[in-house]
Image (tube, rainbow, N blue to C red):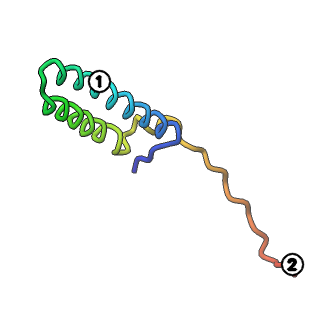
Amino acid sequence: MNTMDFKGQYRASIVQSVLIWTVGLVGFVLGFVNQSFRLTFFCILGATVLSAAVCLPSWPWWNMNPVQWQKPKKQNSSKKA
């Protein structure tokens, strides 16, 4: 099972933001030029679906810096009161 590490979470957040903002601006310009809010809406909707498909699943490229956990300490069997 793949997991997403902390740097992968950061990169996924950056990819999602850049993708939605870039396509949103392009969609706004296209919608303004064509006088079509529908075109703007579908551009942003497509970018949202694409970013969800890329960023939500835990793809292997989001786990390139896995966390190395420490080994647990051995506990003594005798309890001190």
Q: Position of residue 47 (x, y in %)?
A: 25, 33
Is 63 situated left or right of 59 in this image?
right
Residue located farthest toward the bottom when viewing the structure as drawn:
81
Crowdedness near tag 2: few (<14), some (14–19) or many (≥20) residues, C-alpha within 10 Å? few
- Callout in the foreground (2, 1): 1
Q: Secondary structure at mark 1?
A: helix
Q: Position of residue 16 (x, y in %)?
A: 37, 34
Say if mark 2 contacts mark 1, CB within 8 Å. Answer: no
Q: Position of residue 24 (x, y in %)?
A: 28, 28
- In this rendering, the count of numbered labels is 2
Q: Going from the N terminus, do you reach mark 2 or mark 1 first?
A: 1
Q: Secondary structure at mark 2?
A: loop
Crowdedness near tag 1: few (<14), some (14–19) or many (≥20) residues, C-alpha within 10 Å? some
User: Quadrant location of the C terminus?
Assistant: bottom right
Tell which of 73 and 34 is nearer to you.
34
Residue 36 picture quarter: top left
Residue bearing mark 2: 80
Q: Against 69, is 54 above or below?
A: above
Tell which of 55 and 16 is nearer to you.
16
Is 56 situated left or right of 3 in this image?
left
Residue bearing mark 1: 25
Tell which of 59 and 79 is nearer to you.
59
Residue at (30%, 36%) from the top-left corner? Answer: 51
What residue type is disc 1 on? Leu
Residue at (45%, 44%) from the top-left corner? Answer: 4
Residue located farthest toward the top when viewing the structure as drawn:
33
State how far apart marks 2 and 1 are (Cα).
66 Å
What residue type is disc 2 on? Lys
